[in-house]
Every structure is written in structure tokens, then in C-alpha cells.
Amino acid sequence: MSAEITGSDELGELYRELILDHAKNPRHFGKLDDATHVAEGVNPLCGDKLKLYFSVDHASRIADARFEGSGCAISVASASLLTDTVIGLDTERALKYFATMVERLARANSHRQGSPDLLDEIDLGKLRALEGVKEFPSRVKCATLAWHALNSALQGKPQPVSTE
Amino acid sequence: MTTSSTDRLSDRPPHADAVENCREDFPALAQNISGHPLVYLDSAASAHQPECVIDAVAAYQRHSHANVHRGVHTLSHRATEAYEGSRDAIAGFINANSRTEVVLTSGTTGAINLVAQSYCRPRLQTGDAILITHLEHHSNIVPWQLVCRQTGAELLVAPIDESGEVNTEELIGLLDRNVLMLAIAHVSNALGTILPVADLIGAAHERGIPVLVDGAQAVPHLPVDVQALDCDFFAFSGHKMFGPTGTGVLYGRESLLEEMPPYQGGGDMILEVRMDGSTWNDLPYKFEAGTPNISGVVGLGAAVTYLQAIGMERVARHEHELLGYLTERLAAVEGIRLIGTARNKASVQSFLLDEIHPHDLGTILDHQGIAIRTGHHCAMPVMDFFGVPGTARASLALYNNRDDVDRLVAGLQKAREIFA
């Protein structure tokens, strides 16, 4: 990691218009009464608290997704983009998005080797807007919180997840 | 660097004789962050160290290190002199009646846990209570929750109002409910409120109730005289008063400390150890089990000497004036909500800006070289009271100036532009 980041381009990359739009006007916000899979993501030090709801049909397809809670612009935008993305996907594919997002966003923070197969397979599309966090190591956990909650929900893990 | 005796360490002249030009004594402040000169407004979380503290620690490590209170060799003697010299400096700084009343701890948290477990736990029974206030730091809440759970006692909480002031009438009313200890902040870390501690101590003492004061946010900013306050316990941390982390102080009234059993067992705190039982060392060593943070305490002693040379009255005056300026400038920012508007405050201003989450503010300010704290400030009940998940907090220390405040305000304008 470089000792100093200069200029303000990184800030513009972090707070892209798409991110600010989803933070201010989150999509699929609210509770899903007929949810089959639910998980909470809580970063207690930050105070970010998200609850994600998914309704998965008999064909293992995510028929609907919603989230509620509060957090910073990055965590809310990430949850909003997540719900937008996974509705209509089968759960296996949604979990591949999870793995890809975590790999992409956390790479700046770790020396782990990426999995080229995985990265090639998934086209992140507008989720790339979240990649601005790579220059802000302390904010990666904000962007990945909802994705870990997705993973927990679909794997049926009852404990709230945290990325702190 | 040729310092080779502890005498020279403790006699080291401070680099500043007035608060106005002390900033240059703090090497960490003279750096750029994200291409901008650092504006450090997070001293309430941890303060920076002046060069004399850094040098004292380094000189100790280079020339004087050995274990304390043991051994007849020269280095052990030097280490002991340096360590105990810091205790003397601290005793003088807070005007303790005796050096035996100054217990060196790992920090405020360690000091409060010591009192909860050693003073309160043997005394508390079901039906007894500990009284705190709603604005306490977690370290002045959780140790009491633990001891209440252990003993069946109740934790009572005196309420605060919208400005962040403690309702003293209600607090005094609660004292009559079998309270065994009143534990209160001197200065709130999240709101900056200065509590009327002397009055509250007087009211508690009229009822025979001892008082612990969490002074972590007071000692770096205000003159503190434990005898004038007449408190029974006073806890504070080294790293918030320009000393190293892992150091802290529990001042305790000697008569109370004498009555208390040791908190932790180990080396240094014993007089004699036999397999069928042991006897305890004298005060304050009874409460200092194990090899202490010697180098840290040496640094803390240097920090005390530094603050004394400047003068805490001067520090308080400078910060009071600067906090007034900070509050006035922040209040003029469109979309700002100030959290913590007590009449009597020190060092701290919490705030929210528009709908911008504090963490986003923190990132945007950091990108302009400005360090503030964001989040719940280890005071989640305060956040709940104000109905917010967290705040942005600017906190001042003696090295801050009006330029820092101006940079903060400009930084907030930039955040508003991004989120417009």
C-alpha cells in the first residue's frame, strides 16, 4: 500500500454517482414477509447494521430480495446493488457473485491469490462501481458486509456476520 | 543521544514554555496525509507524544532498562529510579497526598476494573447499587455491570438531557437507593460535558458514599487536584495525556486502598510467599502485580513534566478559547447538527452533517489530511439517547489551533459538495 494517496481522484472513484444514487435511494429497501432466507450483517464498531431477506423458490431461484437497516453510503449502496443483482439468479450463481466480490474488493488488503476461473466467469457489470473501495482499505469492510450476509443467508447460517 | 543517567532524563528541559508554540514539539504532527498537512482532531481517542516523551522512552530503552524493584545492579537501580520518579511526578501533578496513593495501571480501564473488583465486589450484596450516569464511556459502564452480575447488585443510571448535561437533582436523588459507589466521568468523551464533580462528590460524601471519577478526558485538558475534588478514586490514561499507550493511573485514597485486597496476584505485589499463604506488599505495590510497563511509565513521567512546564491553567485557557471557535464555526455550517451542547464543556464537539453517515465524512476528511473520530465513541448509550448510530467527533488538544478548525470546516464543505 502506498504511504500517501494524492489528489482527489480516489475520492471520486469511491463516491461514484451510481454509489451515491444507490445510497440515497436504496432499491428493494424494506422487509420481505415471505422470505425463506434471512441474515444480518453487523459491524459493531462502525454501527453498520443490515438485514437481508431472500425468497428462494423451488427451483433454487432467488425470486425476490430486500434489505433494511442503516449504514454508511458504501454499505447501503452495496446492499442495494446486491439485491438488484441477485434477483432472478439461482442461489449457486449468487454465491459465485459473493465469492467474486469478496475476492475483488479484498484483494487490495491481502496477499491471497485470486482465482482466475472465478473472476473470468462472473461479469460484475455495475457492481464494478464498488471497486473504488480498493484504495480505501478501511472501507472494504463496508462494501463486503452485505455480501457476507448474502452468503450466510443462502448457506443457512443463523449467526449475524461481521466484516470488522 | 548520550543520556546515560535517569537524573538527566527527569531533568530534561521541556521544549516549550507556552502552549502557543508547542505544536513543533510533536513530530507526528509535521507530516502530510493524502498530500495535505495533517490536521489531528482525534486526541480524545489518543493524543500524540512530544519529542521529550519519545526521547525519554528511547533513552530509557537504550541505557537504563532492567527490571524494577529487584536486583542490586546499576541498571536495575536506574530503572527503579526512573519508574518511581514518574510516580512522584504524577503524584505532584494531581496533588495526591502521598505517592503511595498513585497506583500505576495499564490505563483507565484497568484502574476502574481494579476498583470494581477489589473495592466493590467484596462489599456488594443483593439490594445494593452502583450509580453511574448515562454519558459514561463503556469503560465506566461494563466493569460495573460485571461486578453487579457477580454480586446481584443493581446498576443505577442518572439521566442526561438534550444538551448532554447530567440531571444533578435526579442523580442526587438516586444516591439514597443503597448506593455503594458513585462512578462518574469528569469530562464526557462523546459530548465534552464537564460534570460538576466536586458538587456531586460532596453530595455523595454527605451520604457516606465513595466516588470514583473517570478522569481520562479531564487530565489532558484541565488542572486536576484530587485533594481539592475530595474524590476517593480518580482514574486516567497515559496515552490521552501525551504519554505512551498501556499506561494509566489509579489514584486512591490511602485509607480505602489499605482496606482493599489485591486485584491480581503475582510478582512484585507480595511481601512473602509460602505454599500455605502469602502476605501482600505495601501500597501502592500491592496493586502492581508483575513486571510493569516500565518504559511506558518513564514516558508518562516525561509527559507530566512537559505539561507542568506549560501549565495546565494555560492549556485549559487555550483549549477553552479554541473550543468556542470550533463550536461557532461548526454551528455556521449549513446542515450541521451539534451533539453535546452543555454549558460547561472541554475539548470535544460531536456533530452530524446532513444525512451523510459519519464514516463517509471521516473518509472524505481523511482524504484532505484531517483526522477525526467517527462512530459511537465507546459510548453507545449516549448514541441511543440521541437516536443516532454514531457521530463525527472533533477533539482538541493543546497543540491544535484556529487553522485546524478552518481546515475542518472547509473539509465539511467539500463533503457537502460530494453528497449534494
Image (cartoon, grey):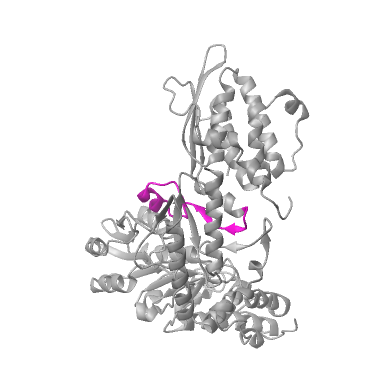
In the rendered view, tell whether residue A128 sits above or below residue B293: above
The quarter of the rendered structure image containing the C terminus of chain A is: top right
Residue sitting nearer the eye, B349 or B203:
B349
Q: In this rendering, does residue B41 appear at all? A: no
> Quadrant of residue A82 in the image?
top right
- Residue B292 drawn at (x, y percent): 58, 71
- Residue B386 drawn at (x, y percent): 37, 50
Left or right placement of residue A114 versus residue B85 in this view:
right
The residue lying at 68 percent from left, 42 percent from top is A134
In the image, the segment drawn in magenta is B367-391
> Quadrant of residue B151 in the image?
bottom left
The residue lying at 61 percent from left, 77 percent from top is B298
- Residue A8 drawn at (x, y percent): 66, 49
Q: In this rendering, does residue B244 appear at all? A: yes
- Residue B181 drawn at (x, y percent): 32, 65
Residue sitting nearer the eye, A137 or B64:
A137
Residue sitting nearer the eye, A24 or B240:
A24
How many labels sit on residues? 0
- Residue B381 highlighted magenta (yes or no): yes
- Residue B258 highlighted magenta (yes or no): no
Left or right placement of residue A152 versus residue B115 in this view:
right
Residue lying farthest top?
A59
In the rendered view, tell whether residue B154 sits above or below residue B389: below
Left or right placement of residue B404 versus residue B325 in this view:
right
